[in-house]
Image: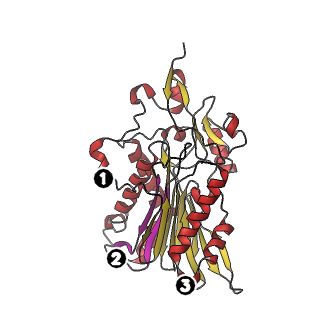
């Protein structure tokens, strides 16, 4: 007898959106494949009440904008199948002048998914802030003075091992968190700027680009991250060797949709990215939390960096976003730039249907 435990997971959206999930039934005899025990965990999707106080949730309003000395961020919560506003699972992070060092900044986007995605993205933001406020992570017995040079050396030493270890430990902390992460997780694209050095670490399909002004007074695009999809050759190889399957959803509305990761022979987890934080079940079939890195030097021609969730990139290309930025630069009104990016993203979602993903971007101005 093959007993079934029903687990309610948000259904894939009836559009081109890449991050949805199936409602599924899991056979208990095959749970070992996914390294979980639904019977014991009951997939509790609720965080304990006493823990909620530590989370600074976004208000349920249509549009929000936040401004710092060198950055502007905007976010708009998404809509569900019925057109109702849903919980915004996107989070942005911006830490200006870490350790009170000028021109040493961190900024990025985390895009949560699954029913606990907002808890995952918020948790990760807080842990990143803690890590970059703890001087002991960057000093040693022989060198207790934090400088830009020391931070850069620590971040890049031994093929970015400090950051890789941080995200690996963060994944372990998520597993032990008070909210369930079997089918919930987040992307995480972070830019670390130290004077003219730019390091971007990426997990998932949120994205960051740098705009440089060339001799023709035009803006060139430098990609700071690559979207991590299960169809990418190296990602695909790892997932298949880990016992996963890669295929689109088998329901009629998504037959032509993106390729997703499944436990072999099962209807879960159905995730369309190959690297995430959280997502315990997906981790059992080759989805990993190790970031990929791109490092560049900024020049006198460097203009700005934008990080955005795939609520922007779902329908807008890098070139589309660049053109919106350039078109709306009149008077250096970067508030308007952010609003127009979100506005255009929203239009594209409305053209597709009722559903709208959370839309978030943060711009850093040089």
Q: Secondary structure at mark 2?
A: helix
State the residue lying farthest toward the top: 1
Q: Secondary structure at mark 1?
A: loop
Q: CA distance from mark 2 to mark 1?
A: 25 Å
Q: Earlier in the sequence, mark 1 or mark 3?
A: 1
- Locate residue 309: give its quadrant: bottom right
Which residue is denoted by mark 1 in the rendering?
54
231 up-or-down from 72: above or below: above
Name the residue: 73% across, 42% down.
Answer: 256
122 and 336: which is toward the camera: 336
192 up-or-down from 53: above or below: below
Q: Position of residue 353 (x, y in %)?
A: 64, 49
Q: Which residues are magenta?
A: 87-110
Tell me the number on the disc at residue 331.
Answer: 3
In this image, 138 relative to 205: left or right? left
Name the residue: 58% across, 73% down.
Answer: 296
Q: Count residues near mark 2 (Cα–Cα under 10 Å), then give few for <14, some for 14-19, many for 20+.
A: few
Q: Count residues near mark 3 (Cα–Cα under 10 Å), then give few for <14, some for 14-19, many for 20+.
A: few
Q: Is residue 165 visible?
A: yes
Q: CA distance from mark 2 to mark 3?
A: 30 Å
Which residue is denoted by mark 2 in the rendering?
100
In this image, 163 relative to 311: left or right? left
């Amino acid at each position: 007898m093959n007993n079934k435990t029903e687990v309610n997971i948000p259904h894939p959206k009836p559009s081109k959106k890449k991050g949805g999930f199936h409602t599924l039934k899991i056979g208990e005899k095959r749970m070992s494949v996914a390294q979980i025990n639904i019977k014991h965990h009951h997939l509790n999707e609720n965080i304990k009440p006493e823990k909620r106080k530590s989370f600074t949730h976004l208000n349920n309003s249509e549009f929000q904008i936040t401004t710092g000395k060198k950055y502007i961020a905007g976010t708009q919560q998404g809509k569900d199948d019925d057109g109702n506003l849903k919980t915004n699972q996107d989070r942005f992070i911006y830490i200006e002048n870490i350790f009170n060092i000028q021109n040493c900044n961190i900024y990025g986007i985390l895009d949560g998914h699954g029913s606990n995605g907002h808890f995952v993205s918020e948790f990760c933001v807080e842990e990143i802030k803690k890590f970059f406020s703890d001087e002991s992570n960057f000093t040693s017995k022989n060198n207790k003075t934090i400088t830009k040079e020391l931070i850069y050396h620590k971040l890049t030493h031994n093929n970015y091992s400090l950051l890789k270890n941080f995200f690996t430990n963060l994944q372990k902390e998520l597993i032990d968190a008070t909210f369930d992460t079997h089918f919930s997780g987040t992307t995480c694209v972070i830019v670390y700027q130290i004077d003219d050095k730019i390091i971007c670490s990426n997990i998932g399909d949120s994205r960051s680009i740098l705009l440089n002004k060339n001799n023709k007074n035009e803006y060139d695009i430098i990609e700071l991250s690559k979207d991590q999809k299960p169809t990418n050759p190296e990602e695909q190889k790892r997932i298949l060797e880990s016992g996963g399957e890669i295929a689109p959803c088998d329901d009629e509305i998504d037959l032509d949709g993106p390729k997703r990761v499944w436990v072999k022979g099962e209807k879960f987890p159905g995730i369309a990215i190959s690297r995430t934080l959280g997502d315990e079940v997906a981790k059992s079939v080759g989805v990993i939390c190790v970031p990929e890195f791109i490092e560049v030097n900024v020049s006198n021609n460097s203009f700005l960096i934008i990080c955005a969730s795939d609520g922007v990139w779902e329908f807008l290309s890098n070139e589309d976003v660049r053109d919106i930025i350039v078109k709306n630069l009149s008077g250096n009104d970067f508030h308007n730039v952010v609003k127009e990016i979100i506005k255009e993203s929203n239009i594209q979602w409305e053209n597709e249907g009722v559903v709208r993903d959370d839309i978030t971007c943060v711009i850093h101005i040089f």
